[in-house]
Image: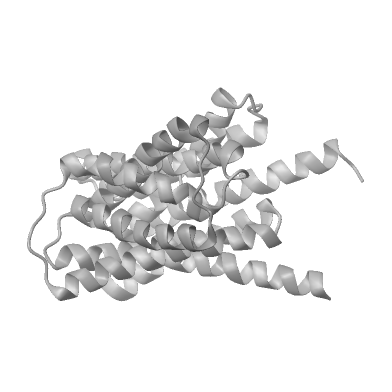
């Protein structure tokens, strides 16, 4: 009974994380509509989020980091914070919250390639199929409207698309980094050191401007919900569920983000956009379930 209750709690934690991450696009657009530049919004998301992680780490005594791990954590700060936060918010400003969220979830395809190159994982057939589905989905989402309406590729906001793909790549590094380091440290410890490095990585590209109290409110809301709270509840879910189940539930994020973008900003896809979104989500699920099925066949009970 207690084990079943823990599983239900795990599902709720991961669903909560997916919901919170889905707020990134709509809340970022709100912040930018109040006159805050995209990269400044990303900077304050990191900086304000860091204050909550720092308070948590100090309060719980989880602030120690081994010196030999410092270079890896600093690199993660640049790639997983500066690049991810910056590229994602710029993509949102160029192509909208819905499309940027879908492009972010090309991450599983990047994970398959990086794990093959860096971790020595085999590039099995199901991974190649999933990669093909992901690429087809990206083409439908980003290029489909221009191709099918006859407007030509000149109508595509290619920088926004490329930044969305870059955010997916940088998001994939969370998995690669986590394979080695997340087991050693708690979430507050990791972000206590990674977020300041991420802020410094963004700083040279940020132009600070005057901000209203409303802008500060939404930036603080974004930092608390999509950075501090989202990562906290996600890893609580991981403690209670298998990684496979956790990943499946988390794929609801781009779906929720598209819903929020439609309700809040009136963003919508055409047929090719919905087709591409479906292909990318299907590729994520196929990657996860294909890996699980292969593991079960190789290690029968």
Q: Residue at x 23, y 46 (%)?
A: 150
User: Residue 104, how many percent across, how many down?
Assistant: 40, 48
Observer-nearest residue: 229 or 293? 229
Direction from residue 103 to residue 210 in the image, left or right: left
Q: Position of residue 237 (x, y in %)?
A: 62, 62
Q: Residue at x 45, y 45 (%)?
A: 137
Residue 148 in the figure: left or right of residue 7:
left
Residue at 36% x, 45% y is: 81
Q: Can residue 140 be seen in the rendering of this structure?
A: no
How many discs appear? 0
Q: Nearer the viewer, residue 238 or 127?
A: 238
Residue 24 falls left or right of residue 122: left
For the point 78% across and 40% down, the residue is 295
Which residue is at the far right? 301
x then y, percent, for residue 261: 33, 67
Q: Residue furthest left?
A: 210
Residue 99 location (% of width, % of height): 34, 54
Q: Quadrant of residue 143?
A: top left
Q: From what the image shows, is residue 18 above or below residue 137?
A: below
* Residue 178 visible in the picture: yes
The answer to whether residue 38 is above or below residue 293 is below
Q: Quadrant of the N terminus?
A: bottom right
Between 47 and 34, which is closer to the camera in this rendering?
47
> Which residue is nearer to you in this view: 35 or 271?
35
Look at the image and name its color scheme: one colour
């Amino acid at each position: 009974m207690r084990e079943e209750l823990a599983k239900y709690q795990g599902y709720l934690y991961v669903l909560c994380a997916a919901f919170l991450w889905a707020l990134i696009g709509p809340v970022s657009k709100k912040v930018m509509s109040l006159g805050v530049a995209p990269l400044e919004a990303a900077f304050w998301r990191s900086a304000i989020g860091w204050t909550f992680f720092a308070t948590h780490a100090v309060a719980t005594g989880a602030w120690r980091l081994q010196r030999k791990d410092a270079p890896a954590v600093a690199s993660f700060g640049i790639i997983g914070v500066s690049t991810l936060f910056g590229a994602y918010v710029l993509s949102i400003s160029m192509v909208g919250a819905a499309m940027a969220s879908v492009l972010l979830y090309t991450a599983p395809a990047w994970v398959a390639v990086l794990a093959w190159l860096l971790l020595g994982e085999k590039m099995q057939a199901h991974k190649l199929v999933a990669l093909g589905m992901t690429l087809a989905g990206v083409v439908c989402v980003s290029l489909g409207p221009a191709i099918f309406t006859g407007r030509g590729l000149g109508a595509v906001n290619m920088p926004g698309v490329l930044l969305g793909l870059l955010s997916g790549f940088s998001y994939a590094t969370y998995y690669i980094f986590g394979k080695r380091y997340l087991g050693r440290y708690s979430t507050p410890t990791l972000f206590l050191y990674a977020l300041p490095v991420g802020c410094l990585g963004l700083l040279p590209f940020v132009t600070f401007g005057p901000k209203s109290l409303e802008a500060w409110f939404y930036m603080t809301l974004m930092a608390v919900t999509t950075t501090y709270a989202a990562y906290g509840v996600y890893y609580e879910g991981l403690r209670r569920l298998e990684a496979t189940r956790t990943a499946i539930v988390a794929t609801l994020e781009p779906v929720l983000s598209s819903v929020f973008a439609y309700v809040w900003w009136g963003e919508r896809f055409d047929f090719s956009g919905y087709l591409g979104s479906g292909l990318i989500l299907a590729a994520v699920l196929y990657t996860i379930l294909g890996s699980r099925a292969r593991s079960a066949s190789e290690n029968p009970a």
